[in-house]
Image (cartoon, coloured by chain):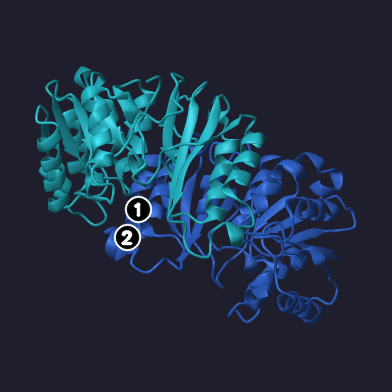
Chain colours: A cyan, B blue
Amino acid sequence: MKIAVCAPARSISQAGAARVAAFAALYYPGVELIVDPQVFALAGHFAGPDGLRAETFLKYANDPAIDAIWFGRGGYGSNRILDAVMPELTSAAYDKAYMGFSDMGFLLGALYARRIGRPIHGPMASNVSEASKGVSVGRALGWLVDGDRSALEPSLRGRPAAAFNLVILCSLIGTPWMPDLTDHVLYIEEVGEAYYRIDRLLFQMANATQLKGVAGVRLGAVTDVPAGDGEAEFGESLEGMMTRWCRDMGVPYLGRARIGHDADNMVVPFGIA
Amino acid sequence: MKIAVCAPARSISQAGAARVAAFAALYYPGVELIVDPQVFALAGHFAGPDGLRAETFLKYANDPAIDAIWFGRGGYGSNRILDAVMPELTSAAYDKAYMGFSDMGFLLGALYARRIGRPIHGPMASNVSEASKGVSVGRALGWLVDGDRSALEPSLRGRPAAAFNLVILCSLIGTPWMPDLTDHVLYIEEVGEAYYRIDRLLFQMANATQLKGVAGVRLGAVTDVPAGDGEAEFGESLEGMMTRWCRDMGVPYLGRARIGHDADNMVVPFGIA
């Protein structure tokens, strides 16, 4: 099995790449992990210029010998290559898995909208460097390589699902890149946002015409909330916000989920797993 | 002329209210400025609970004796009363001016979408406390009371216009609260956002189906960019971002404008001034 690692947003370190290569060699010796040098490129905020990031993604997406694209890292920037890559995807791109989360939601959402390949919300190659002791990347490869169902978010239960970072979901709203999520359970998670910003994002989710048909919403981890901008200052809990906005949205709030910017980031394949 | 001050988002201070009342008494003695005590209320992040903020806005909007509602302050929260207030506005609300900016863009946009009254992007009552030495509030009252055209953003020139804080504009995208801005020049401004976030917001503006018909975009002030997240780190200037995203949007980038979170915040009436 061949898995390619590229970085459509920010770069990863040489040390991080060496660690994930070592991990794969140790536990998945049957996997050929191809880490493209583009992941180390630097251009301002990004892992190389838009053109290089687009070209690298297309090279692997359109290669029939590659079974999966495993995104290296999020950050910001994959939205800037959508225009360049989406119209250029060929048949090889359809028979392939794409795994990542956070900023990669732009690509996962746009792929799912066009029914291209198997977009999967899950840990990325750079998550090997976390305090997760290999659990995150082991889970990602467990699903990609062996279809290990213990890697899946436990509430999936055969219902159509989609998972997004909340900021990325809201950035897709009102654009043609947003997939149709009718009858899907929508999983959201957030990192580094003040409560008042989370509430504003939930307003947009709840009022989005495109999301009127979702079957329900689940909330994953909300991590790294800036000091002084949490529940105490805002005056409302996350559960309170979710309940109120889901009521306005007219869909059930289904409770918490195990996705997010932490080691407990379980796998959520788009559609039915 | 009767002008009511209410606060649909965050509260203002007693000192700020006293200052703006003194300013109006000094320079606009013919104006009866009614500062509702709701502006001092506190409930978590907000100037009182959603219900009180909605009720106070409706009380003045539906009062035929009130000529204008001058919003006290932005922050966050006016989106939370849209559902409660918009369907309750009566004929008196149509014959009235509404002035504010920043978070007040939720209300201005929703009013404009429904063709209710005269929404105006301009300084707020709490802007009396700034280093602007009264210039901001003088400009706001100059337009509201005397129709003083020197208060207007100089590029307006009789073309239909609308102005928004970029985050607020993007929060309206894909929702029924977004007005139709076909053939309007769109003015945007931002405060306190990292360059990568501004770029992400511009992506959404440029890709928004609802905004495809705008006549062009102008950029106001971009203030209080967090340290370490500006042009140097991002690798692209504001002009570069505007040019690129407006090109993708298929509309002309018309250059800079005098609106924003500073003392040079000129008045932009929605529609034709």
* Secondary structure beneath label 2: loop
Question: Which quadrant of the rendered structure holds the N terminus of chain A?
Answer: top left
Q: Amino acid at mark 2?
A: Ser
Q: Are marks 2 and 1 on the same chain?
A: yes
Q: Amino acid at mark 1?
A: Met
Question: Which quadrant of the rendered structure holds the C terminus of chain A?
Answer: top left
Residue B246: image location, x then y, percent: 39, 46
Query: Is residue B184 visible to the viewer in this orientation of the structure?
Result: no
Say above or below: B179 vs B16.
above
The chain letter under disc 1 is: B
* Secondary structure beneath label 1: helix
Residue that mark 1 sits on: B241
The answer to which quarter of the image holds residue A148 is top left
Residue A59: image location, x then y, percent: 15, 31
Q: CA distance from mark 2 to mark 1?
A: 6 Å
Residue that mark 2 sits on: B237
Say above or below: A187 vs B148.
above
Asked whether disc 2 touches disc 1, contact meaning CB atoms under 8 Å apart, the reply is: yes
- Give the side of residue B76 with respect to residue A99, left or right: right
In the image, A49 versus B186, the foreground residue is A49
Residue A30: image location, x then y, percent: 10, 27
Residue that appears at 86% across and 58% down:
B66
The chain letter under disc 2 is: B
